[in-house]
Amino acid sequence: MKTVWVEGATGKAGKRVAAALAAVGFPVRAASRHPGSPTAGITPVRFDWADESTWTDSVAGADALFLKGLDTLDDAASLITRLIAVAPQAGHVVLMSALGVDKAPATAPRARVEHAVRESGRNWTILRPNWLMQNFDEDDAVYARAIRDDGELYAGSGDHRASFVDTRDVADAAVAVLTTGSHHGRGYDLTGPRALTFAEVAGTLAGASGRPISHVDADLETHRAHFARSGRPDAWVEHMMDLFVHVRADVFAPVTDDVQWLTGHAPRSLDDYAREVFAPAPDDDARVLTGLPQIFSPITS
Ligand SMILES: NC(=O)c1ccc[n+]([C@@H]2O[C@H](COP(=O)([O-])OP(=O)(O)OC[C@H]3O[C@@H](n4cnc5c(N)ncnc54)[C@H](OP(=O)(O)O)[C@@H]3O)[C@@H](O)[C@H]2O)c1
């Protein structure tokens, strides 16, 4: 079995890619700045894009790399080129990019990252997921905190739509391309089964949780202030604002069958996700039994 080095292994996508690979018997080196304890098949390794002295040991012994790169650095592309160079034994590089990047100008930072992978001299595959559903419950900076604390889904999106994808489907797609040894030189657009407005998303989350959750259709400047309150760097705030310009241009509206094609199963729907993650547990015992990460406490009154 080939060993796969997984970047961002504590993040929404990376942790699921690592777990899914381990579940099918592929050893994983799980890379992040905060490696935890080993679990079956998963060896956490320290890795920091900002500290090149961590790179060589981190990728040692990896036959394949699952990369996403950083969004907030101008030199993300050259960092990826240098990282691949210190892993000469890695024959396959899989990049998690983002929907629409292949249509962006060649000078756009994420387009330059894709270019760096295509020109790496290794076998490569590029996965381009749409917005991840797990932003709604796991990413406080993007949506989760405002949904949880204020019942607000902040999105300056108007009535434009996005075909949100469940991160578990991204992980399943990554496993398909990393374990079969095919899909080289290919790019795949990973979407959910339907394009939804943010108001429809809010309605679905509200219906599943039994709590009021509304779409706040802010103008872009108000939206910028919302993201700035996250405390993330200015470059991240600008990246998020750029994404909403693209939402308004319907870049994230297409629905593809690439999840079905790669994984053999239909993409999970937002209804499925909301029922699993947002439904209040009937009681604490049930929560322990199901193991589902409900984000709201049970309603007791
Ligand atoms: N979220 C979406 O909706 C979405 C959709 C499509 C594409 N994408 C792409 O996916 C990427 C984000 O993935 P995600 O949502 O899974 O990420 P995430 O949940 O935000 O997690 C970020 C990961 O990056 C790691 N990290 C942060 N800074 C690092 C550094 N300096 N060195 C090494 N590791 C670092 C973090 O680990 P530590 O903090 O432990 O180091 C963590 O594992 C972005 O490139 C984005 O363009 C995201």
Image (cartoon, grey):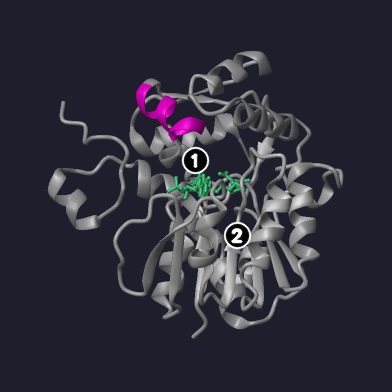
Q: CA distance from mark 1 to mark 2?
A: 19 Å
- Above/below status of 172 relative to 77: below
Query: Does residue 277 belong to the magenta stretch?
Result: no
Callout 1 secondary element:
helix
Where's residue 63, x and y in %? 57, 78
Indicate if the residue with disc 1 has its beta carbon within 8 Å of ligand 1: yes
Q: Which residues are magenta?
A: 140-149
Residue identifier under label 1: 135
Q: Residue at x 50, y 77 (%)?
A: 3
The chief SS type of the magenta part is: helix
Asked if one can make out residue 189 in the rendered structure from this viewpoint, the answer is no
Asked which quadrant contains residue 226, the reply is: top right
Asked which quadrant contains residue 94, the reply is: bottom right
Q: Residue at x 80, y 57 (%)?
A: 115
Residue identifier under label 2: 67
Numbered circles on residues, count: 2
Q: Is tag 1's residue or tag 2's residue first in the polypeptide sequence?
A: 2
Where's residue 114, x and y in %? 75, 56
Q: Residues within 10 Å of mark 1 (few under 14, many from 20)?
A: some
**Residue closest to the far left:** 285
* Residue 254 shown left or right of residue 19 in the figure: right
Amino acid type, label 1: Asn
